[in-house]
Structure formats: C-alpha cells, structure tokens
Image (tube, helix red, strand yellow):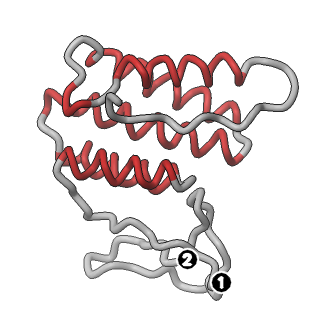
Amino acid sequence: MSERDRDDTGKPLNARPRDGLGRPLPRDSANGVPQIPDDLRLPPDEAITEAQRLLDHGMPFHAHEILEGAWKSAPDEERNLWQGLAQLAVGLTHLLRGNSKGAASLLAQGHNRIRLYEVESPHGLDIPGLLAWSEHLLAEIDRPGDFPAPPIPRLRIP
C-alpha cells in the first residue's frame, strides 16, 4: 500500500489527476484536468465568473470548488448563499456521474439555502433563475426513464 501525499502540516492530499467531473484517475494518467487549489479564495465577482466558465465547460465539480472557496471566506450573512451555490454545483456533478439520489439531496439542500436570498439577489446572481433550474432538475430526477441532458445553470442575471 502506498503512502498518501501530505502537505507540510501532515494533512492528507489527493494528488491523483481527476477528470472533468472530479473523479480520480490513475496516478500515471495524462488525461487529468487542472485541479482547483484548496486554498483558492476569489472575490465574489471573480468567483461567480470563474464558476460560470467552469459550468459552461462541463466541469461542475471544479465550479463547486471555486464556490466552496468563496463560502469559506464569505461574511456570515452570505455563508448560506455560497454554500447553497456550491451544493447546486456538486449536485449537478452527482447527476452527471449518474448518482441521482445524491444529486437530489444536494440540489434540494442548495435550493433551500439560496432561497433565503431570492428577494435581494446579491452580486448580480439570478437567484430566481437558479431556483427554477434546481426545481426543474429535481422534477426530472423523479421521472421514470432516461434522464435528459441537464441544462447548464446561469449564475448571473442575463
């Protein structure tokens, strides 16, 4: 059994390359996509722009990492917002990986968190649109048969 990679403080790291949906690839794989650094913290506007770029390129797991960084550095009054956005992105990740149960749970949790910001829609976010998007996915998950390709969420008001 090989030793896990660790940072300077002894925290375990996962240095394996990952695919576009964040799934680990073999260590020697040359097909991995660049990972988001664990300590990356972007200001809100940059985080939203980068998360949207990643969503547009079919990388919701990586968008989740960006949004999680914003959540970790957000002021208390916005923590639910950023956590909810991160949960929506990772919910989409689970959906695309074929884990409909995990997707439904995370989409519902994210939906309920961002709902608190529907009236004010901070940072130009399209909270009503994201709520409609997540409601659509949750309704589609419960339908029998093959799940159609999910639409890409739009984070900002068009």
According to the picture, the residue beneath numbered tag 2 turns out to be: 16
Camera-near label (2 vs 1) is: 1
Asked whether the viewer can see residue 53, the reply is yes
Name the spot of residue 59 as percent of width and height, x first: 53, 55
Residue 29 is tagged as 1
Q: Of residues 110 and 6, which is closer to you in this image?
A: 110
- Callout 1: SS: loop
The relative height of residue 93 versus residue 87 in the rendered view (above or below) is below
Residue 9 is tagged as none
Quadrant of the rendering where the C terminus is positioned: top left
Seen as rendered, the residue at the extreme top is: 119
Q: Earlier in the sequence, mark 2 or mark 1?
A: 2
Seen as rendered, the residue at the extreme front is: 158
Quadrant of the rendering where the N terminus is positioned: bottom right
Tag 2–tag 1 contact (CB < 8 Å): yes
The relative height of residue 15 versus residue 90 in the rendered view (above or below) is below
How far apart marks 2 and 1 lie (CA) works out to 8 Å
Q: Answer few, some or many: residues within 10 Å of disc 2's Cα (few below 14, many 20 plus, some between 14 and 19).
A: some
Seen as rendered, the residue at the extreme right is: 145
- Callout 2: SS: loop
Q: Of residues 51 and 14, which is closer to you in this image?
A: 51
Q: What residue sits 27% from the left and 50% below the top?
A: 47
Q: Is residue 108 left or right of residue 114?
A: right
The type of residue carrying mark 1 is Ser
The type of residue carrying mark 2 is Arg
The relative height of residue 49 versus residue 25 in the rendered view (above or below) is above
Q: What residue sits 70% from the left and 21% below the top?
A: 140
Q: Answer few, some or many: residues within 10 Å of disc 1's Cα (few below 14, many 20 plus, some between 14 and 19).
A: few
Name the spot of residue 107 as percent of width and height, x first: 52, 28
Q: Is residue 44 left or right of residue 23?
A: left
